[in-house]
Amino acid sequence: MTPASVVGVGHLWPPRDLTEGEAPDARFTLANERTFLAWIRTSLGLVAAAVGLEAFAPSVAPDAVRTPLVVVLLVVAAGLAGYAFRRWLSVEGAMRTGRDLRGSPATIVLAALIVLAGVVLAVAMLVT
């Protein structure tokens, strides 16, 4: 009995994206992993920004602005971590089966959210 089947996920792991087709060149797999880790690093940066804003900058903006901004940063960070895994798996599967790689709309969304958070924080600082 494998460890995965002991905990009840034996039918889920490894997913089809990691078992179909032929294994790609290790350099491409490692590059895909580095990209995944970069997304995770960005997610951790958003968590750090949220914690820093809440813990160390209570006078920067009023609670009515700061708390929702912190919550949004944390939710985006969690979503980004989940997206990073799905993207890694998708790219790995595409490399194994020869499918085209799709672009990532997450970069535009993430950049827009960070700009929006910065603008909200700047306006809140000017108002107070």
Image (spheres, grey):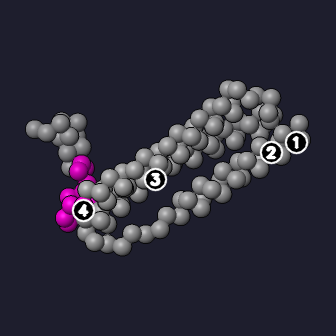
User: What amino acid is labelled 3 in the image?
Assistant: Tyr
The image quarter containing residue 63 is top right
Point out the stretch of residues depicted in magenta.
12-25
Asked if residue 113 is positioned above or below residue 91 in the image, the reply reads above
Q: Which residue is mark 3?
A: 83
The residues tagged by marks 1 and 2 sit, at their Cα atoms, a distance apart of 6 Å
**Label 1 vs label 3, nearer the camera:** 1
Q: Eyeballing the image, is 33 above or below 4?
A: below
Q: Residues within 10 Å of mark 4 (few under 14, many from 20)?
A: some
Which amino acid, by three-letter code, is at mark 4? Pro
Secondary structure that dominates the magenta span? loop
Say which amino acid is labelled 2. Ala
Does the residue at mark 1 contact the one at mark 2 (Cβ under 8 Å)? yes
Residue holding disc 1: 126
Residue appearing at x 65%, y 31% in the figure: 52
Disc ID at residue 122: 2
> Which numbered mark, 3 or 2, is in the foreground of this view?
2
Using the numbered discs, state the Cα–Cα distance from disc 4 to disc 1 in whole angstroms: 53 Å
Residue 102 makes an appearance in the image: yes
Frontmost residue, 52 versus 62: 52
Q: Which is more toward the observer, 110 or 63?
A: 110
Q: Crowding at label 1, few (<14), some or many (≥20) Cα neighbours within 10 Å? A: few
